[in-house]
């Protein structure tokens, strides 16, 4: 018997006609005499899965949607494998992006305290760092926690940052500038770590983006 390469879909168990989940009477089954090769899993989820396989029987049965040459069959398989790989990479990159953002916003350590680093926190830090640099240009000295008064009469007598544990961390202008750079480096490190992880995924590595060791 001649073996034919085919594309096909499910047929109804009772009627033998192409399966339609909305109207079919029985469950989905493979057409008679067909041996499964591979499915177009890259199209999942779908109500009408598509398959490729071989048969030594008739090729004009319901459910059989195409007859292929060996080269066409292998080309379809290769195309499907490439599509699956693109989906794997995209899903992994999405997980890495989620973890990167979560970790950026999860805070960083500074002077023995945990500093919040959500988007609004980073904006506040950047603004305070800029103000501290202005105060330095106006003569703020190390150890002077009242540097904000150099900028405005209503400035705090003791400039302090509210940390994650809701305590106050007094900062002179130099320390505030240092904290601004610490926030920048915290984000920068995670951005480049995420790029490295994405490169590893593209190279074929399977990674668990939530693994803390990957981000150290």
Image (cartoon, helix red, strand yellow):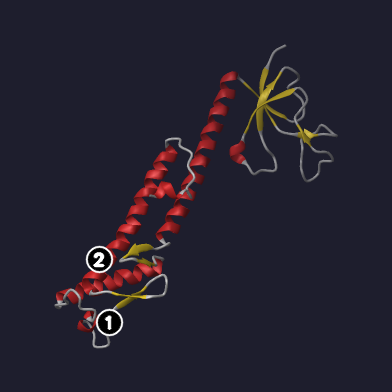
Which numbered disc, 1 or 2, marks the residue that appears first in the sequence? 1
Residue closest to the eye, 146 or 89: 146
- The quarter of the rendered structure image containing the N terminus is top right
Q: Give the structural element (helix, strand or loop) at label 1.
A: loop
Residue at the image position 76 percent from the left and 41 percent from the top: 20
Residue 101, picture quadrant: bottom left
Q: Residue 158 carries which label?
A: 1
Q: Residue 178 carries which label?
A: 2
Above/below status of 114 relative to 40: below
Residue at the image position 33 percent from the left and 66 percent from the top: 112
Above/below status of 55 relative to 80: above
Instruction: Determine whether, in the image, residue 40 is placed left or right of residue 196.
Output: right
Residue 21, picture quadrant: top right
Residue closest to the eye, 107 or 31: 107
Q: Distance between the residues labelled 1 and 2?
A: 17 Å
Residue lying farthest to the front in this orientation: 112
Q: Where is residue 157 in the image (x, y as percent from the top left)?
A: 26, 85
Residue at the image position 23 percent from the left and 81 percent from the top: 146
Instruction: Determine whether, in the image, residue 104 is placed left or right of residue 110.
Output: right
Instruction: Determine whether, in the image, residue 126 is placed left or right of residue 25.
Output: left
Q: Do the residues labelled 1 and 2 touch (CB within 8 Å)?
A: no
Residue 144, picture quadrant: bottom left
């Amino acid at each position: 018997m001649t073996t034919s390469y085919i594309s096909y879909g499910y047929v109804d168990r009772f009627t033998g006609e192409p399966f339609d989940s909305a109207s079919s009477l029985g469950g989905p089954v493979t057409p008679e005499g067909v041996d499964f090769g591979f499915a177009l899993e890259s199209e999942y989820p779908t109500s009408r899965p598509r398959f490729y396989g071989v048969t030594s029987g008739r090729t004009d049965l319901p459910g059989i949607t195409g007859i292929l040459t060996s080269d066409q069959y292998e080309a379809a398989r290769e195309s499907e494998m490439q599509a699956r790989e693109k989906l794997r990479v995209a899903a992994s990159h999405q997980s890495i992006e989620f973890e990167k953002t979560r970790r950026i916003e999860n805070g960083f350590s500074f002077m023995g305290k945990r500093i919040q680093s959500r988007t609004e926190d980073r904006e506040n830090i950047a603004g305070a760092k800029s103000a501290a640099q202005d105060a330095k240009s106006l003569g703020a000295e190390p150890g002077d926690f009242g540097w904000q008064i150099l900028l405005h009469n209503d400035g705090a007598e003791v400039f302090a940052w509210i940390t994650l544990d809701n305590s106050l961390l007094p900062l002179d202008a130099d320390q505030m500038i240092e904290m601004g750079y610490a926030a920048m480096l915290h984000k920068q490190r995670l951005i480049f770590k995420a790029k490295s992880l994405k490169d590893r995924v593209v190279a074929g590595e399977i990674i668990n983006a939530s693994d803390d060791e990957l981000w150290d």
